């Protein structure tokens, strides 16, 4: 019999999950009762049972970042008190975000708690995060996250079981009162699943027949290192030198585990200097990916379009299940729209946030989707999946190389020949003053409401449409408003401006620009050069420098 103590607490301000869970500095989570409050609110908000977590089976996994172990202990104490039936936890708490989604679906769990701030840095002075996923394996929809927030505002008591510290380092089952706690290998189920989705023999054969084709995977000291090692080295038989930074570290080795050209520069430099044909990285929790090649960078917007283009030919999962529809987040370039059109597929444009794809996938209307924020995935799970995207690219490479030798750059150029090129870039202005950023967006919103933008000529561009993106979910009818300022020009070029929902400090302004070209002479142009005129227009229209005081972005992707 376990003793449960009722401990007084008081609500904390701002426990509102953002684009993807609650992300704050570690120091915020370390405040007495802060983490306990949020976990209690999550357990009470579990949608399957009105009584909260009683009888639930929950999968728990994190990316190995600093403070993970302490939060695992808190989850067990509150779960025992709340009557949770079973917790399935990765060894040392380590499971990638897509693997949590995979396991929730496989064991038909009630849901899962993910302990990650994704690509944000880790360590005592960096970030932590907590996210709830539902029984479909996907991030909780706004109806659930709003409920978590409402509960967090009313908490007066915490129910905490009085139990000794739990050891998560050994595989096996333990019993704590009525709760069963199973510590699992967080990599195994996922690797097995990947082997049913992709043709590993075909990829192996490709590497065997092309011994000079070299690949380098960068785990960025995040959670995917062990997955990459198991898949690329042990399953595909590549040399150990094919993986770098593959040990998860609590502070990611001091690096920013975000796979883009800025933060994954170690990979980028090695691919160039050491003549690798294919380079790939995944982020802290394993849901993002970046694909590069010799002298080639695949924008995430192009990546999802190319995967969709080849899916049915190159990937057994889609040969078997077909491709039912495609979707992208609103700021993502329109390259995917062109594939949907050519293949006659249903197509959706949703707000930023993977959670918006879930309903479409559950309804069987979306098979492949992606976001410009280095997120690519399919309905095999309900999270974006970095390692899956890398395997998809390897499958495409193995497939196209059956007829002629093609590298990443060749695959890109072939794609542009068929569809034209959507030049795309995102400028991030991180940790700017929140008030200035909000005022900037408000001003644009005001101009849209007063219809001051449509018809306006800006340099070589004329504005055809301007709105604040709103989404009507076709499955559950929910409405999501104010999802980003969208300015569309007569030639189809676009500017999008929105504030990030994943920052932990101040505001992050995201400025997205896109320009389409079907002039083959332009395809090899460097992205920034091709986009310069529209970037100038975006900065002028938004008056970004005036409102934020920033001359230069923190990151350009
Ligand atoms: C999360 C979400 C993504 C979203 C990204 C950026 O990714 O899962 O759907 O695109 O944040 O969001 P924002 O622009 O609001 O910062 P992750 O990898 O951080 O979980």
Image (cartoon, rainbow, N blue to C red):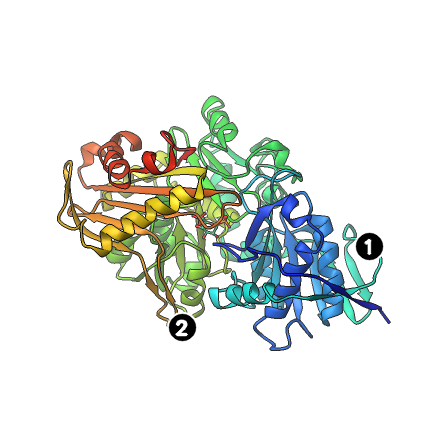
Q: In the image, is 504 to the left or to the right of 426?
A: right
Mark 2: few/some/many CA within 10 Å (<14, 14-19, 20+): few
The answer, for residue 61, to whether it is visible in the render is: yes
Indicate the secondary structure of the residue bearing disc 2: loop
Q: Nearer the viewer, residue 338 or 482?
A: 482
Which tag, 1 or 2, sits closer to the chain's start? 1
The answer, for residue 398, to whether it is visible in the render is: no
Whole-angstrom CA distance, mark 1 to mark 2, is: 42 Å
Q: Nearer the viewer, residue 28 or 70?
A: 28
Residue most extreme to the right: 1
Residue occupying the point 56% across, 59% down: 101
The correct choice, above or below, for 42 with respect to 247 in the image is below
Q: In the image, is 306 to the left or to the right of 161?
A: left
The correct choice, above or below, for 466 with respect to 222 in the image is below
Label 2 beta carbon less than 8 Å to ligand 1: no
The correct choice, above or below, for 236 with respect to 102 in the image is above
Residue most extreme to the top: 273
Query: x%, y% of residue 377?
Result: 45, 53
Disc 1 and disc 2 in contact, CB within 8 angstroms: no
Which residue, given by chain and number where applicable, does mark 1 sit on?
165
Q: In the image, is 267 to the left or to the right of 311?
A: right
User: For residue 65, what is the image quadrant?
Assistant: top right
Which numbered tag is attached to residue 308?
none
Q: Quadrant of the C terminus?
A: top left
Query: x%, y% of residue 168?
Result: 76, 53
Which residue, given by chain and number where applicable, does mark 2 sit on?
476
């Amino acid at each position: 019999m376990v003793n449960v103590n009722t401990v007084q607490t008081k609500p904390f301000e701002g426990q509102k999950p953002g684009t993807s869970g609650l992300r704050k500095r570690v120091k915020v989570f370390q405040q007495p009762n802060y983490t306990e409050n949020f976990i209690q609110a999550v357990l009470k908000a579990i949608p399957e049972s009105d009584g909260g977590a009683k009888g639930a089976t929950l999968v728990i996994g994190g990316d190995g970042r600093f403070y993970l172990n302490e939060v695992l202990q808190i989850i067990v104490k509150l779960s025992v008190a709340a009557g949770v039936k079973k917790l399935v936890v990765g060894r040392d708490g380590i499971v990638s975000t897509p693997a949590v989604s995979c396991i929730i679906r496989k064991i038909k769990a009630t849901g899962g708690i993910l302990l990650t701030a994704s690509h944000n840095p880790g360590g005592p002075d960096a970030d932590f995060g907590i996210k709830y996923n539902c029984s479909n394996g996907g991030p909780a929809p706004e109806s659930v996250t709003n409920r978590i927030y409402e509960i967090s505002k009313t908490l007066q008591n915490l129910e905490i079981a009085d139990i000794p510290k739990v050891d998560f380092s050994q595989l096996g089952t333990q019993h704590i009162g009525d709760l069963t706690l199973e510590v699992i290998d967080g990599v195994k189920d996922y690797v097995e699943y990947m082997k049913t989705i992709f043709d590993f023999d075909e990829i192996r054969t490709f590497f065997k027949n092309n011994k000079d084709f070299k690949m380098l995977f960068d785990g960025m000291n995040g959670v995917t290192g062990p997955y990459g090692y198991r898949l690329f080295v042990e399953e595909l038989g590549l040399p150990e030198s094919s993986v770098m930074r593959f040990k998860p570290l609590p502070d990611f080795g001091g690096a920013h585990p975000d796979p883009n050209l800025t933060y994954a520069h170690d990979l980028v430099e090695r691919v160039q200097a050491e003549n690798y044909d294919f380079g790939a990285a995944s982020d802290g929790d394993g849901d993002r990916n970046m694909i590069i090649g010799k002298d080639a960078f695949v924008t995430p917007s192009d990546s999802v379009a190319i995967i969709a283009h080849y899916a049915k030919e190159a990937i057994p999962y889609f040969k078997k299940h077909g491709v039912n529809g495609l979707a992208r987040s609103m700021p993502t370039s329109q390259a995917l729209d062109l594939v949907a059109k050519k293949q006659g597929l249903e197509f959706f444009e949703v707000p930023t946030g993977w959670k918006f794809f879930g309903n479409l996938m559950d309804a069987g209307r979306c098979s492949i989707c992606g976001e410009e924020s280095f997120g690519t995935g399919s309905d095999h799970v309900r999270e974006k999946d970095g390692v899956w995207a890398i395997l998809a690219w390897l499958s495409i490479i193995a497939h196209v190389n059956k007829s002629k030798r093609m590298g990443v750059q060749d695959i890109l150029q072939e794609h542009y020949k068929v569809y034209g090129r959507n030049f795309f870039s995102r400028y991030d202005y991180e940790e700017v003053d929140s008030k200035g950023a909000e005022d900037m967006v408000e001003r644009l919103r005001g101009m849209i409401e007063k219809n001051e933008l449509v018809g306006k000529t800006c340099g070589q561009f004329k504005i055809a449409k301007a709105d604040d993106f709103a989404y009507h979910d076709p499955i559950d009818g929910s409405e999501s408003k104010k999802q980003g300022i969208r300015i569309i020009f007569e030639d189809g070029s676009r500017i999008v401006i929105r504030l990030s929902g994943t920052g932990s400090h101040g505001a992050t302004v995201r400025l997205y620009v896109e320009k389409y070209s079907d002039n083959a002479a332009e395809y090899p142009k460097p992205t920034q050069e091709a986009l310069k005129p529209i970037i100038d227009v975006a900065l002028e229209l938004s008056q970004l420098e005036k409102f934020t005081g920033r001359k230069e972005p923190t990151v350009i992707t």
